[in-house]
Image (tube, helix red, strand yellow):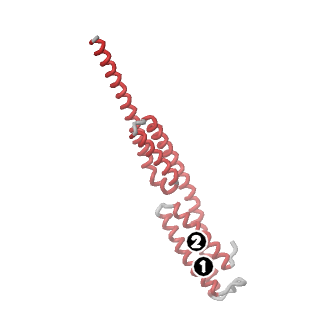
Amino acid sequence: MLKKMNWLACSVLGFAMMLEACGGAEKDATEGAINAAQTAINAASSEAAKYVPDQLKSAQDTLRNAKDALAKGDYSAGLSGAKDAAKKASDMVAAAAAKKQELMKDWTSLGASMPKSMEQIKARMDAYSHGARMPKGTDKSVLATAKDQYAQLKQAWADATAAAQSGNLGEAMQKAAGIKDMLAKLKEMLGIKS
């Protein structure tokens, strides 16, 4: 009977050790996957923050949930979450590159057209200042307002250009959206047909 008890105790101990070893391997695999996902997110975060911040937040949230599952001992949920976070990081890199390319194309187009439009407005204001006939219903007060708005437009364009030159195309395009509206109003005010 004692031999049977020893054998049973050894079997239970062996089984417990085997479970611990399997749990340890599963924990190590989960930790490895979480670390890999964290590295992937960190590598992509600077570009993603500029171009696809919503996807960055989603990847970070998914990784945080995977870490929480690991801390609770739910290795399968942690591993699944880590894999999902790594996939989101990969998708985020592609989306950020595509968005950056799109913004660069838009900025290049805007960079070619905006200075021409601004020069057109300046030339028209100079002509009106030197006695050219102003559009019907326009007087000198409108010209003074246009000059003030043109100064604001120039500053806004300088700010947008500085943002683009620093590599922040998203911010540059946001600023440029307001500039386009200002430009359209100025053209209308001065009787310039687009």
Q: In terms of secondary structure, where does tag 1 sit?
A: helix
User: Residue visible at 53% across and 60% down?
Assistant: 170
Residue at numbered disc 1: 122
Q: Which amino acid type is shown beneath numbered disc 2?
A: Pro
User: Residue visible at 54% across and 71% down?
Assistant: 157
Q: What is the C-alpha distance between the residues marked 1 and 2? A: 10 Å
Q: Position of residue 64 (x, y in %)?
A: 43, 46
Q: In terms of secondary structure, where does tag 2 sit?
A: helix
* In the depicted structure, whether residue 39 falls above or below residue 80: below
Specify the quadrant that holds the N terminus: top left
The answer to whether residue 36 of the structure is visible from this angle is: no
Left or right side of 4 for 149:
right
Q: Position of residue 158 (x, y in %)?
A: 51, 71
Q: Residue furthest front?
A: 1
Closer-to-camera residue (147/57): 57
* In the depicted structure, whether residue 24 falls above or below residue 169: above
Left or right side of 19 for 107:
right
Q: Which amino acid type is shown beneath numbered disc 1?
A: Lys
User: Residue visible at 56% across and 62% down?
Assistant: 107
User: Residue visible at 50% across and 45% down?
Assistant: 88
Specify the quadrant that holds the C terminus: bottom right
- Pointer 2: residues within 10 angstroms few (<14), some, or many (20+)? few
Residue at numbered disc 2: 115
Residue 116, quarter of picture: bottom right
